């Protein structure tokens, strides 16, 4: 028969031996954490308490100095364990083991420390640089750590990407060089400030060459500069050409480049400077760029022709059958004459041309001219444009200007509001040639204007001259001393 004492001993072993479930203690980095000692029944027996982590003994109540554990770990008299200035690597399970003499055995209790710390982020590739060719796929990754687990978000050039781009990897099909630039991964877990990692994506593509201005007005003795913008990766080699031949750089011809900051690509403005233009320098230029992927180019014209005139209305000076205009022209050379073209809107009327001499034959660069157009119909809308000629030839047309005459019942203030529509942006198909190569339209219109002028002159003078002609004939049929004027 089993004795009562032995039964109590067996019950005590059954209740106190074994392992209890883990309890989690959350803490912040650099805090102090206390883990309670193992809970055992107080039977008046000597109990030895030891603390373990990952199979390494941290503290032993029977041999306090034998463990050689970190100075940040300490067992107190009540057998609890203290960790000071906890670090992320201190996270994990800690085992408390209470041992008593046989037959009571030992009790094990597990605690877990979870050290919460801010998110961190690092890019893959770790260099933070990724280079692909246009049309290829780019794969970027962001490795993050932190407790709690960080949430990731991606942005491009400071603009947040859609929610689909919220994972650890970002995959891009680089079909446009505009996708080159700075990609940022942001990791946040609510502890401290978010962490960021950046990757600069460079997309290799052939040079894209554009002109800052393709047509440049100049004249002998004037300094001129031609500018082309080159966007490429890798950076392109750039050369300037004149009439198909490489420009011979010298003190008078030299080049330089201005760098513009655009992440993920090479963007420069290349400048060709001509310190003192000579007549033989006028003509066609090209800016050509080449890299390992391909090439690109853009053309320029350095011309002595005047700039297109800037045609404007003189405010509040219109009437029912006339209109006042003023225009300005940039030209380093003297302006010889102007062509003023006009027609009535919403009709099939052809363009009519007037040749207007220049009032100032001096040098430029700014020339101005005013002109009063008469013979218009009342309460009608018209459009007009102007061209200027210097000794190099005719300029391009100005922008079309629309205007309206005042009806008999309309005030000048109302007319000004009606014709305040501004410039028509599309110039008409006006054929412009030099005097030595005039089109048939120019010749016909000139002859028409001259014929009309002679007819009007004869109509005005004939009533005045007819009495004089009649008086010049005497009764005898002989002519008097008064002779006809023509």
Image (cartoon, rainbow, N blue to C red):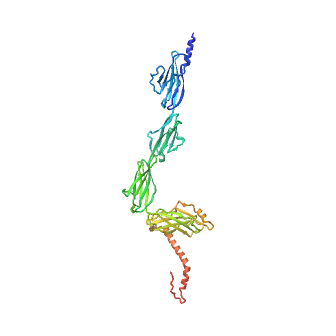
146 and 177: which is toward the camera: 146
Q: Closest to the observer: 427 or 44?
A: 44
Counting from the top left corner in percent of width and height, residue 149 is at 52, 34
Q: Quadrant of residue 251?
A: bottom left
Examine the rendering and report whether any part of residue 16 can be seen. Answer: yes
Total marks in image: 0
* In the image, farthest residue toward the front: 77
Residue placed furthest toward the top: 1
> Where is residue 293 shown, x and y percent of the image?
42, 48
Check the image and name the residue furthest to the bottom.
476
Q: Is residue 433 visible?
A: no
Establish if 154 lies above or below 41: below
- Percent of width and height locating residue 8: 57, 14
Q: From the viewer's perspective, is residue 106 above or below residue 244?
A: above
Which image quadrant: the N terminus?
Answer: top right
Question: Where residue 157 sits: x, y (%)?
Answer: 49, 45
Which residue is pictured at 54% across the width and 21% down the height? 39
The image quarter in which residue 314 lies: bottom right
């Amino acid at each position: 028969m089993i004795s009562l004492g032995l039964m109590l001993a067996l019950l005590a072993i059954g209740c106190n031996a074994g392992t209890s479930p883990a309890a989690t203690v959350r803490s912040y980095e650099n805090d102090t954490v206390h883990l309670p000692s193992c809970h055992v029944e107080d039977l008046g027996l000597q109990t030895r308490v030891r603390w373990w982590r990952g199979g390494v003994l941290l503290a032993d109540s029977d041999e306090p100095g034998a463990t050689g554990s970190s100075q940040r770990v300490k067992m107190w008299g009540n057998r609890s364990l203290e960790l000071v200035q906890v670090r992320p690597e201190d996270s994990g399970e800690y085992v408390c083991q209470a041992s008593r003499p046989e037959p009571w055995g030992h009790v094990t209790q597990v605690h877990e420390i979870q050290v919460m710390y801010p998110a961190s982020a690092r890019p893959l590739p770790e260099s933070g640089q990724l280079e692909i060719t246009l049309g290829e796929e780019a794969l970027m990754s962001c490795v993050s750590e932190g407790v709690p687990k960080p949430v990731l978000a991606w942005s491009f050039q400071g603009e947040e990407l859609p929610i689909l781009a919220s994972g650890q990897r970002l995959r891009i099909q680089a079909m446009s060089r505009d996708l080159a630039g700075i990609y940022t991964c942001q990791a946040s877990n609510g502890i401290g400030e978010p962490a960021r990692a950046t990757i600069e994506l460079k997309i290799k593509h052939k040079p894209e060459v554009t002109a800052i201005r393709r047509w440049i007005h100049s004249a002998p003795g004037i300094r001129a500069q031609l500018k082309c913008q080159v966007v490429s990766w890798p950076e392109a080699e750039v050369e300037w050409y004149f009439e198909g031949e490489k420009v011979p750089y010298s003190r008078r011809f030299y080049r330089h480049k201005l760098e513009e900051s655009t992440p993920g690509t090479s963007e420069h403005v290349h400048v060709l400077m001509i310190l003192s233009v000579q007549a033989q320098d006028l003509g066609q230029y090209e800016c050509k760029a080449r890299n390992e992927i391909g090439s690109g180019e853009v053309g320029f014209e350095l011309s002595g022709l005047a700039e297109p005139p800037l045609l404007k209305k003189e405010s509040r000076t219109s009437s029912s059958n006339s209109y006042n205009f003023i225009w300005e022209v940039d030209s380093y050379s003297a302006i010889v004459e102007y062509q003023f073209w006009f027609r009535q809107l919403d009709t099939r009327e052809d363009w009519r041309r007037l040749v207007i001499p220049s009032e100032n034959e001096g040098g430029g660069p700014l020339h101005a001219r005013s002109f009063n157009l008469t013979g218009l119909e009342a309460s009608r809308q018209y459009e007009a444009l102007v061209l200027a000629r210097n000794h190099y030839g005719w300029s391009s047309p100005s922008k079309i200007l629309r205007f309206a005459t005042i009806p008999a019942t309309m005030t000048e203030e109302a007319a000004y509001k009606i014709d305040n529509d501004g410039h028509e942006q599309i110039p008409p198909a006006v054929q412009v040639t030099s005097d030595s190569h005039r089109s048939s339209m120019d010749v016909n219109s000139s002859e028409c204007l001259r014929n009309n002028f002679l007819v009007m002159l004869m109509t005005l003078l004939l009533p005045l001259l007819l009495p004089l002609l009649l008086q010049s004939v005497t009764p005898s049929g002989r002519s008097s001393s008064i002779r006809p004027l023509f």
